[in-house]
Amino acid sequence: MDPTLSLPINSSTKNPSHIDKRAWKTAQDFESVYLSTMIGQMMSNLSGDGPLAAEGTGGDAWRGMLTEEMAKTISLSGGVGITQSIYSELIRLQSTAGQSQ
């Protein structure tokens, strides 16, 4: 999925040329890591048969890959709402750092 499809939309960012795409990608990546941790914790106590609960190295590897992909997909499709906040904070920190030099 194209990450530019979920760029922040508000009165100051309606024109995509004003968006720092690198900061937006960083914010999405942060949310993805957060979601991966959260989903990983939810899946950590699964037991029984099947690919998600299989014992051993194969089950752990499969569960880890699935967790990462689920987190990326959730983040790219709107996430849990922290990408916009992180993006705004990154832009604020960048402008503050630029003023202090």
Image (cartoon, grey):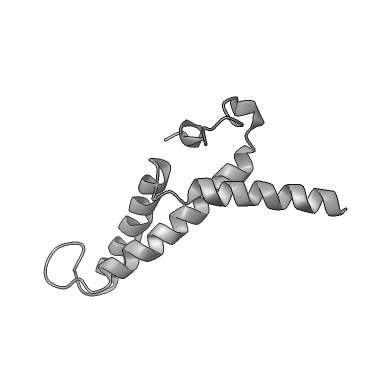
Residue at 38% from the left image edge and 56% from the top image edge:
68
The answer to whether residue 40 is above or below residue 18 is below
Image coordinates of residue 42 in percent, x first then y, are 28, 67
Question: Could you tell whether 22 is left or right of 61 in the image?
Answer: right
The answer to whether residue 52 is above or below residue 57 is above
Residue at 46% from the left image edge and 33% from the top image edge:
2
Image coordinates of residue 4 in percent, x first then y, are 51, 33
Question: Could you tell whether 47 is left or right of 30 in the image?
Answer: left
Front-most of residues 67 and 16: 16
Residue at 41% from the left image edge and 47% from the top image edge:
75
The answer to whether residue 9 is above or below residue 101 is above
Residue at 23% from the left image edge and 74% from the top image edge:
45
Image coordinates of residue 61 in percent, x first then y, are 32, 65
Residue with the most extreme top position: 15
Question: Could you tell whether 46 is left or right of 7 in the image?
Answer: left
Residue with the most extreme left position: 49
Residue with the most extreme right position: 101
Question: Could you tell whether 76 is left or right of 4 in the image?
Answer: left
Image coordinates of residue 51 in percent, x first then y, are 19, 62
Front-most of residues 9 and 28: 9
Image quarter (top left, top right, bottom left or bottom right) of the N terminus? top left
